[in-house]
Image (tube, coloured by chain):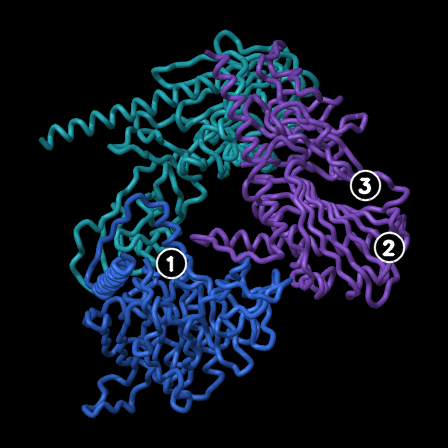
Chain colours: A blue, B purple, C cyan
Amino acid sequence: MFIRDSWYVAALSSELDEKPISRMILGENVVMFRDSQGAVVAMADKCPHRGYPLSLGTVVDDQLVCGYHGFTFDCSGTCVAVPGQDRIPSRADVRIYHLVEQGCWVWIWMGRGEADLAKLPSTPWLTDKENWSMVSGVAKIDAPYGLLVDNLMDLSHETYLHNGSIGTPEVASTPIEVEVDDEAHVIRVYRHMTSVECPSFYSRTTGLEGKIDRWQDIEYSAPGFYLLHARIAPVGQPPLPDGSDDHAFHMKIFYGLTPSTKDIVFDFWALSRDFCVGDTEIDTFLQTMQTGVVQEDVDALNILQARSLTEIEPTEVSIKIDRGGLAARRVLNSLAEKELDGYSVEQGERSTLNV
Amino acid sequence: MFIRDSWYVAALSSELDEKPISRMILGENVVMFRDSQGAVVAMADKCPHRGYPLSLGTVVDDQLVCGYHGFTFDCSGTCVAVPGQDRIPSRADVRIYHLVEQGCWVWIWMGRGEADLAKLPSTPWLTDKENWSMVSGVAKIDAPYGLLVDNLMDLSHETYLHNGSIGTPEVASTPIEVEVDDEAHVIRVYRHMTSVECPSFYSRTTGLEGKIDRWQDIEYSAPGFYLLHARIAPVGQPPLPDGSDDHAFHMKIFYGLTPSTKDIVFDFWALSRDFCVGDTEIDTFLQTMQTGVVQEDVDALNILQARSLTEIEPTEVSIKIDRGGLAARRVLNSLAEKELDGYSVEQGERSTLNV
Amino acid sequence: MFIRDSWYVAALSSELDEKPISRMILGENVVMFRDSQGAVVAMADKCPHRGYPLSLGTVVDDQLVCGYHGFTFDCSGTCVAVPGQDRIPSRADVRIYHLVEQGCWVWIWMGRGEADLAKLPSTPWLTDKENWSMVSGVAKIDAPYGLLVDNLMDLSHETYLHNGSIGTPEVASTPIEVEVDDEAHVIRVYRHMTSVECPSFYSRTTGLEGKIDRWQDIEYSAPGFYLLHARIAPVGQPPLPDGSDDHAFHMKIFYGLTPSTKDIVFDFWALSRDFCVGDTEIDTFLQTMQTGVVQEDVDALNILQARSLTEIEPTEVSIKIDRGGLAARRVLNSLAEKELDGYSVEQGERSTLNV
């Protein structure tokens, strides 16, 4: 079951223009495009007439014209024209979705009711272009959402799966601390590595050599938003008591985990850094590196999922590094149950009203 | 459920020679070839021995030899040789199908009983080569038969899906008239456009320029034969009361709708024209154009079907242009029910006989 | 249902080195590699942690390290290291399989209990390299195991499917003799052809021309081992009463039939000959020819299986040449039932013990 009352990343900002694109999100086909003012628009990607994908149509004068028989919709989803007659049938409107564009990402509200803007994740590092430089991308994984959550919550896999790029021996060998905020449904996992190997991509971008202190602090806001606060610094130079941290280099690693179907998930990512700001050569280098890292995850999860389909009874042996992932599963289950309860209540109320 | 007691187009005439080909029609694997006299032959494409497709065998002396162990069948489906012994087992014969070749098409009778030649569609425009010139082709669509019926019964889609070739704005905007002959299970849809844009392919082939009168009269004989009577003429020059129509140009657009499986349909087509007769350059031009038009339908229906598989409850909003398609669905359902009833009666009789 | 209490060919000897490979055998994912001494090792290809295939890991110091999070196993399947902690969890060991390497083939015991070495097939012609020369290969077939048994038990198909290489008219036309040893679950099929055409590959390798005597004696040890004793000799020169047979040329054609899933089977093969021993040019010639012959079987069985999936009720007409195949089916059913009974008894005993 999907958790619907939440914001998910629907698209990279760069993916949207006047030509409609289609994306299945939480089992729903959504068509997205920009109107003539540049505003992002999303609606159900299905013509009410005969079900043809509206994403195969064209946008004319801020109206989306179906490519099969010409049913036409304005940006509020209202049907404004049909072929062969002047009268517009009732029931021909399409559902629209609330979108919010923040930096390189476009968020969508997938809940049944009004979009809850208070729940929209805050991502200042994606919009403050003066102090932060950013690259982004998206990959599609043929695996359920849960496998990607498992993957991201346990970074010990960097040592093995991403060996040669971001992985070093100490990521796997360093114990973690885990905190869970059940109310906010946020799981935090801290891994503070002291006097450890500096991955070559950090040497290249920061100029640091030899041993470093390296922190990886995960902040996962279930269900769809994951933020890794990465900090590297010369050995023995922690942030000052007042919070200032000028000796260190910071990177924010964002993941938007957007279920497509129950067996497919979109893996949106973005990297923001407070060093080499504005250096487009470093942009290109990091874009290429992270695309490769994400592809290693994609390959691994695709394989894991294909394997799981041949398993009669999947079993697991969990250890201490799995505490973050296990906490995430518990929080996700709780959110799903809460939503199911809410929906039952709602249905119950309706029944009462109908009586 | 398939409607079996009917003729369907099984092959283009040009597809058949001494090398057997296989085609699944109404869920049955059929092998077809020509004997040494050029006559078309069809039988069940399955060796009774171990089920190997006979279409992978070879025709030797008008006998089809299985490519696995050599079981051999004459053109009446009788098994005439098996390996390792002289005695031919009973039950080793294969079913044959009645074929009729008419112009560029080969028809097959898929009913349980004797082929009913009275039901064979009449297609004089495919055989009268003195007065008509003809091109033909076939495409396979990964969609149920019903989606192709919907497509052909509502030509308003020409304006959008076939924009740039056969589609002009007036096709979608012109209202239609519908007639249903329930007894003959024929649906007729008339669209008479007056003083409208001439599609470029008609200008090129007829020499007409500027506005024209353009008629599209559909005659669909459910389940498998669709004929579009197309007429274009200078504005204001209808056929004379005696039926003569020398000022006009006529094209007959044929479709053979042949279900393969419940999710696949063959889309046989042919174009016959009474102008530029014998002009092979125009033949090539129309062959290329119509192949492109059909491919646009194939693409659309493949997409529509792929989409429908992700829908929990498909919904539709129908308008006036859909009356032809809705009538066709009603007639097809009635035919299917009638056949089911007939089959039940037959089964009932058998039960009685067995008692 | 698979017959588990048996040896199956798991790999060609040449497929195994220090890099792990994965193969699904009887529905179980198995990882195989060689340790630093060259010994062959097999274990369950699934990390107990999160199910990642161990075959994607690496062998370091005779230990297999998982490529996802680094769980590490020695060659006895014991887990010896996990990330982030020193304590090794119980239940983290993986199952190992008993392998035996004999000539070009590596056998695996797939039974639930201890490997029964008494049941291991004897294949002296694969190890006596002084008197026999050998080539081998493996193919994967998208068809159930039973279709390959059918194929190999009825060699009349050589005449049609392998026409042009090993097939001649007399293979199909010559009657067979069949013997069944139910106790040893061995089926023997004899086809002795007298004064028949010499296939060109035998002419080329033996120098025989014109008519020959050709024997094909099948010895199928159900479920997984098939041996064809091929003998060709000048006409009228049978083996002497003392068993010596110096005028003849002998070839042993081995098949290891290893079910992968219920719909996939591995077709391991090997050819051993007592002529042109040590001639590597003949090796290459026979390797190429047999690879082609096996591919013809693969293609035919893939097609047959694809076809069978479209059949509602498969039917068969059997004749005399099918007696070997029908006997094989009977013996295989009996073996499967016996194993099912044994398992039930075992379960029954367990139940008693639990009471």
Residue A92 visible, this angle: yes
Numbered disc in front, either 3 or 1 = 3
Disc ID at residue A301:
1
Q: Are marks 3 and 1 on the same chain?
A: no
The quarter holding residue C60 reads bottom left
Residue A321 visible, this angle: no
Given residues A302 and B336, the one toward you in this image is B336
Q: Are marks 1 and 2 on the same chain?
A: no
Three-letter amino acid code of the residue under disc 3 = Leu
Farthest residue to the left: give it. Answer: C355
Q: For mark 3, what is the residue?
A: B126
Circles 1 and 2: CB distance less than 8 Å? no
Which chain is disc 1 placed on? A
Secondary structure at badge 1 equals: helix
Q: For mark 2, what is the residue?
A: B248
Secondary structure at badge 2 equals: loop
Q: Earlier in the sequence, mark 3 or mark 2?
A: 3
Given residues A174 and A139, the one toward you in this image is A139
Circles 3 and 2: CB distance less than 8 Å? no
Residue B26 point in image, percent of width and height: 59, 35
Say if A145 sits above or below C197 in the image. below
Three-letter amino acid code of the residue under disc 1 = Leu
Residue found at x 26% / y 55%: C49
